[in-house]
Amino acid sequence: MAYVGAAGRGEGCLLCQALASSDDRKALVLLRRPLAFLILNAYPYAPGHLMIALTRHVGTLADATPEELSQAMAVVQAAIRGLDRGYRPDGYNIGINQGRVAGAGVEGHLHIHVVPRWNGDTNFMPVLGEVRVLPESLDATYDRLSAALGSGERPG
């Protein structure tokens, strides 16, 4: 409920704020690279829902450099390896929502969603109750993925 109660608060870009934070755990940042970083989604569709964002505040694929996109995809690969070790999902939804009309919750800062999926992981709650049921807290997810990613590394 703390996350839901804080929704819509704050000014500026939440991804830039997370990147500027000196407390990765509090900011939910799992991995940093010079051009891209990995962060837990604070409002996940499923346990382990991650986002890979460019470190530069840029809003569209067309405005990103090939180097930024290449490093972002390398972080997607690292995220999938960590999720495979930490959760063993049966598959993934991986995608970009560019613009509010396309479903972007964070407009103006390009990011890629990685959502682990399991056979039979759909249920009636999102359809009838407009709620999602998650089996663990974000703190537990952070700890599990941090260990699976070996996130102690902090490359320059």
Image: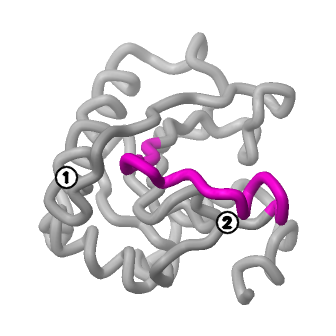
Is residue 3 placed above or below 37 in the rendered structure?
below
Mark 2: few/some/many CA within 10 Å (<14, 14-19, 20+): some
Up the image or down, 124 lies above or below 148; here it is: above
Q: Residue at the location (28% across, 44% down)? A: 90
Measured as percent of width and height from the top left, residue 25 is found at 41, 80
Kindly identify which numbered label has been placed on residue 93: none
Residue under label 2, please give it: 132
Based on the picture, tell me whether residue 8 belongs to the magenta stretch. Answer: no
Residue at image coords 26%, 55%: 83
Q: Would residue 76 be seen by someone viewing this image from the given angle? A: yes
Q: Secondary structure at mark 2?
A: loop
Task: Name the one closer to the observer, 117 or 59.
Answer: 117
Image quadrant of residue 124?
Answer: bottom right
Residue drawn at (66%, 30%) of the image: 97
81 relative position to 95: left or right? left
Residue 156 seen in the figure: no
Of residues 106 and 135, the one nearer the viewer is 135
Residue 13 in the image: x percent, y percent? 71, 54
**Residue 42 percent location from the top left of the image:** 60, 67
- Per the rendered image, the range of residues in magenta is 114-130
Which residue is found at the position 59% from the left and 11% from the top? 62
Real-space Cα separation, disc 1 to disc 2, in angstroms: 22 Å
* 132 in relation to 126, above or below: below
- The disc placed on residue 84 is 1
